Image (spheres, coloured by chain):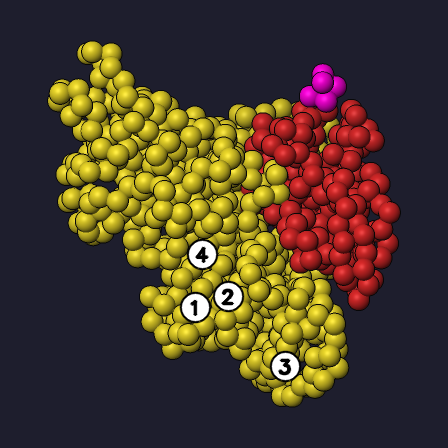
Chain colours: A yellow, B red
């Protein structure tokens, strides 16, 4: 594997590919004996790191770069141990392969906020191994023990004699030396990159428009494809008349797929234009009878009528004591129903993939979150072995879980196999992207709770109802236990509760559903932290003090205290302003937020969002802040605008005109406090989202006394100011 | 199909296209200039933002036939080496996350700063209508203020 340093800030996939095979470059290729065992001789080190003859360090990230900054984080971990100069580090994307598996997942898959936590030790060890080789090479030249040498600033140094050699001078020797059997990781007190937020390496690419997304891939002879999928979920193509479309300018061919029509053309616009001229008859199938409004009424019934049944009996997540007795005894009792709709991912880059199928081989270019899954899907589809599929990864224009699904890769392969040898770039139109997503499922939550005069929660009964994410396509996988995602965030035991019954009533539907940023926490955070606020109010307590008094865990309480202090909790506010607080634990991190809003005539202005996060340690603190900001905007977009409706089995929304996003003008001021507790490192891509909506809803209540129990706000008489 | 001569980033380009073909797809699929992105196809999201005779233009809904004899500027022409003050401010404030909307966001910011060298928050709010799903908005705001200071000192 060879790499070339083109311009200091411009290493793109394309340039690396062009450089490959030039035969003039040196790569890091010798065995890493005894490393880890699993990866075998040297494979691991080779896979993740090479050093060019000029000393440029090229690090391979196994994860998708979706905006979460893992491109930089992974490079930083290796560079820290290696002793590399940050401005001489480049990054490339790996292909698909077991060697790139996340050690915590045993799978190469980007998600669950595990990119930093999962690869943390592995990548540091890779860097330390290479450091060992470089030190050994220098030690041999100087005739000193390797243990007396160390690396810094892209050099090996021998402190006792003051001698130094640049990496570039040592690479040729170092690659002939076996990596050390054991490595010593650097003392965190001496970190120069970890925890220091060096400038992110992907940013110059994005700021110059030169980062390659799948939509930007260009190959000789490539054609563009547009797709019209049967609008009804699960429907089929009955017939098509493509005569007129096939004769349009720029059109190469029109294809009838099982449930879709595809046009292949010289440009995407010509393909899309011709697609509208194809006369199509669909066989709508069973989902044509599905209506999300009726289904959501059903969810409300499931959480209010204890005898109502969805797919089966409710599955219990938490039982403490007897809630019925406690509720019956309590004079301070509240109850109600919360609900949230289906949501689309709406990544800015619509689903896209380039595929070339020829002679039993397949090549893919994609921003997939699951390279191995994409590879294996294509292989199964084509009846070839996974080794015959090559995955080239690109930057992803947003993922949020959407690009974990292999459907868009499968569809690109489905088109490409019909034009053998021709690279086909499939781009979903925004409408197809919106209407053929794997949605965050709609959920409802019914609750009854009681408190006593001292501020103790004496009873909490919660029932959530909705479709199972992880039983979608494999019904009954969890037996009589709840799908963990259906109750995540409801069963964490953050608060001391006298009696509780928390369960989930499953209701499967024909709507494709899938992981969406923060998954079950995305709705359960809103339910749980709004309900806790209702209980605080019922107890006549300050919402922060109420929570604090019910928390037994020091670490959680510290996060809550930190956010309250940073947000000036308790200080006077102007008329019409209010503060709300919320806390949620997930992905190994604890996040608390305080929202400040002003409300007038049911118009809400988001003034300020203060976040405290304890993620154990922050590899790149500025990126942690960026992820908190992004998670909040994502959560508040859903809170204010997000709703997907299904009518007669078809999604009604199609574009940003009817599935709007929060805009710059709507965005509050952000402040983030990072707590370095030294506990085990947690993820940061997702946990910033769940507290945002309840913090704002609780702030609205504080400002005007109205409780928000149904989202999005725009559907319930609220607007942003 | 017709022939059009387009002036893009100061250079003349001959293209053959349907007169209705939007500029975005001429740039991307005819000329291989992929810095301007496709996001919505209806002129809402701004990922395709370019400048035409200085004005902010959503190229995904702007037909090529209306582009002749115009001065078209795309992200590719902003600088050879990411040295434009707006790009420098973008790096300093570490704005992008996934990066997909950022070409359009930067082109819109460049236009704003040429019209209004020291924009207020309210002016930024009113002008920057580009959509970003990752939530880079607070950093976009900071970067515009920073670029304004850099340009004032230059």
In the rendered image, residue A370 lying in the magenta stretch gets the answer no
Please tell me which residue is depicted at 49% across the width and 46% down the height of the picture: A15
Subunit ID for the residue under disc 1: A
- Label 3 crowd (10 A; few <14 / some 14-19 / many >=20): some
Subunit ID for the residue under disc 4: A
N-term-proximal mark, 4 vs 2:
2
Please tell me which residue is depicted at 46% across the width and 54% down the height of the picture: A393
Vertically, is A399 above or below A594?
A: below
Q: Which residue is mark 3?
A: A288
Residue interval drawn in magenta: B149-154
Residues tagged 4 and 2 counted as in contact (Cβ below 8 A): no
Q: Which mark is residue A362?
A: 1
Please tell me which residue is depicted at 83% across the width and 51% down the height of the picture: B67
Vertically, is A471 above or below A401?
A: below
Please tell me which residue is depicted at 33% across the width and 29% down the height of the picture: A168
Q: Which residue is mark 2?
A: A355
- Label 1 crowd (10 A; few <14 / some 14-19 / many >=20): many
Q: Which residue is mark 4?
A: A392
């Amino acid at each position: 594997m060879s790499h070339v340093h083109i311009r200091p800030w411009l290493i793109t996939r394309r340039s690396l590919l062009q450089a490959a095979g030039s035969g003039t470059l040196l790569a890091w290729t010798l065995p890493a004996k005894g490393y880890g065992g699993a990866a075998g001789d040297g494979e691991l080190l080779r896979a993740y790191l090479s050093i060019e003859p000029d000393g440029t360090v090229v690090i391979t990230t196994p994860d998708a770069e979706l905006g979460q900054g893992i491109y930089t984080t992974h490079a930083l971990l290796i560079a820290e141990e290696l002793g590399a100069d940050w401005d001489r580090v480049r990054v490339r994307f790996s292909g698909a392969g077991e060697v790139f598996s996340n050690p915590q997942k045993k799978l190469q898959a980007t998600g669950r906020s595990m990119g930093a936590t999962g690869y943390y030790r592995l990548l540091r060890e890779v860097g330390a191994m290479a450091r060992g080789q470089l030190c050994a090479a220098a030690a041999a030249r100087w005739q000193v023990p390797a243990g007396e040498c160390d690396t810094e600033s892209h050099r090996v140094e021998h402190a006792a004699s003051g001698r130094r050699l640049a990496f570039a001078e040592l690479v040729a020797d170092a690659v002939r030396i076996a990596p050390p059997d054991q490595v010593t990781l650097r003392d965190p007190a001496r970190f120069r990159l970890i925890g220091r937020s060096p400038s992110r390496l992907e940013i110059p690419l994005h700021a110059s428009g030169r980062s390659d997304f799948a939509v930007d891939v260009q190959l000789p002879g490539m054609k563009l494809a547009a797709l019209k999928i049967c609008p009804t979920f699960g429907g089929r193509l009955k017939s098509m008349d493509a005569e007129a479309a096939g004769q349009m300018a720029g059109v190469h061919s029109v294809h009838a797929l099982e449930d879709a029509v595809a046009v292949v053309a010289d440009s995407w616009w010509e393909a899309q234009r011709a697609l509208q001229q194809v006369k199509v008859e669909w066989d709508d199938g069973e989902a044509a009878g599905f209506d999300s409004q009726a289904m959501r009424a059903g969810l409300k019934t499931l959480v209010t009528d204890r005898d109502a049944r969805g797919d089966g009996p409710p599955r219990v997540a938490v039982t403490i004591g007897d809630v019925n007795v406690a509720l019956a005894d309590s004079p301070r009792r509240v109850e109600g129903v919360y609900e949230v709709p289906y949501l689309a991912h709406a990544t800015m880059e619509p689903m896209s993939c380039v595929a070339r199928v020829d002679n039993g081989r397949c090549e893919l270019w994609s921003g997939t979150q699951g390279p191995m899954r994409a590879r294996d899907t294509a292989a199964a589809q084509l009846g070839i072995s996974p080794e015959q599929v090559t995955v080239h990864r690109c930057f992803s224009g947003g993922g949020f879980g959407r690009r974990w699904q292999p459907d868009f890769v499968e569809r690109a392969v489905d088109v490409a196999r019909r034009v053998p040898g021709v690279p086909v770039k499939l781009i979903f139109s925004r409408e197809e992207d919106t209407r053929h997503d794997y949605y965050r499922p709609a959920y409802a939550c019914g609750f009854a709770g009681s408190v006593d005069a001292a501020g103790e929660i004496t009873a909490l009964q919660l029932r959530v109802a909705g479709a199972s994410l992880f039983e979608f396509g494999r019904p009954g996988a969890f037996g009589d236990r709840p799908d963990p995602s259906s109750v995540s965030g409801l069963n964490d035991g953050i608060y001391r509760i006298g009696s509780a019954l928390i369960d989930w009533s499953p209701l499967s539907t024909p709507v494709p559903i899938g992981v969406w940023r923060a998954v079950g926490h995305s709705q359960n955070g809103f339910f749980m932290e709004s309900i806790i606020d209702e209980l605080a109010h019922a107890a006549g307590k300050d919402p922060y003090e109420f929570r604090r008094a019910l928390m037994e865990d020091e670490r959680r309480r510290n996060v809550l205290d930190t956010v309250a202090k940073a947000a000036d909790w308790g200080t006077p506010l102007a008329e019409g302003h209010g503060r709300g607080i919320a806390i949620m634990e997930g992905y190994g991190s604890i996040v608390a937020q305080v929202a400040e809003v002003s409300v007038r005539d049911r118009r809400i202005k988001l003034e300020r969002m203060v976040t405290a996060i304890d993620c154990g340690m922050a590899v790149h603190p500025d990126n942690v802040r960026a992820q908190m900001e992004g998670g909040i905007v994502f959560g508040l977009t859903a809170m204010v605008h997000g709703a997907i409706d299904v009518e007669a089995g078809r999604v009604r929304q199609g574009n940003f005109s009817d599935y709007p996003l929060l805009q710059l003008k709507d965005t509050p001021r952000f402040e983030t406090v990072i707590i370095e507790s030294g506990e085990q490192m947690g993820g940061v891509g997702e946990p910033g989202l769940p507290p945002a909506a309840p913090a704002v809803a609780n702030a609205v209540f504080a400002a005007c006394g109205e409780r928000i129990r149904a989202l999005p706000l725009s559907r319930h008489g609220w607007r942003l100011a | 199909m017709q022939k059009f001569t387009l002036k893009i980033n100061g250079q003349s380009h001959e293209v053959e296209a349907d007169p209705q073909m939007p500029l975005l797809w001429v740039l991307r699929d005819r000329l291989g200039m992929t810095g301007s992105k496709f996001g919505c196809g209806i002129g809402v999201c701004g990922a395709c933002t370019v400048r035409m005779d200085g004005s902010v233009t959503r190229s995904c809904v702007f037909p090529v036939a209306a582009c002749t004899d115009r001065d078209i500027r795309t992200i590719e022409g902003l600088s050879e080496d990411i040295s434009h003050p707006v790009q420098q401010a973008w790096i300093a404030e570490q704005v992008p996350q996934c990066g997909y909307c950022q070409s359009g966001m930067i082109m819109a910011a460049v236009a704003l700063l040429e019209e209004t060298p020291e924009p207020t928050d309210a002016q930024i709010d009113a002008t920057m209508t580009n959509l970003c799903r990752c939530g880079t908005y607070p950093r976009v705001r900071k970067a515009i203020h920073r670029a304004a200071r850099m340009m004032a000192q230059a």
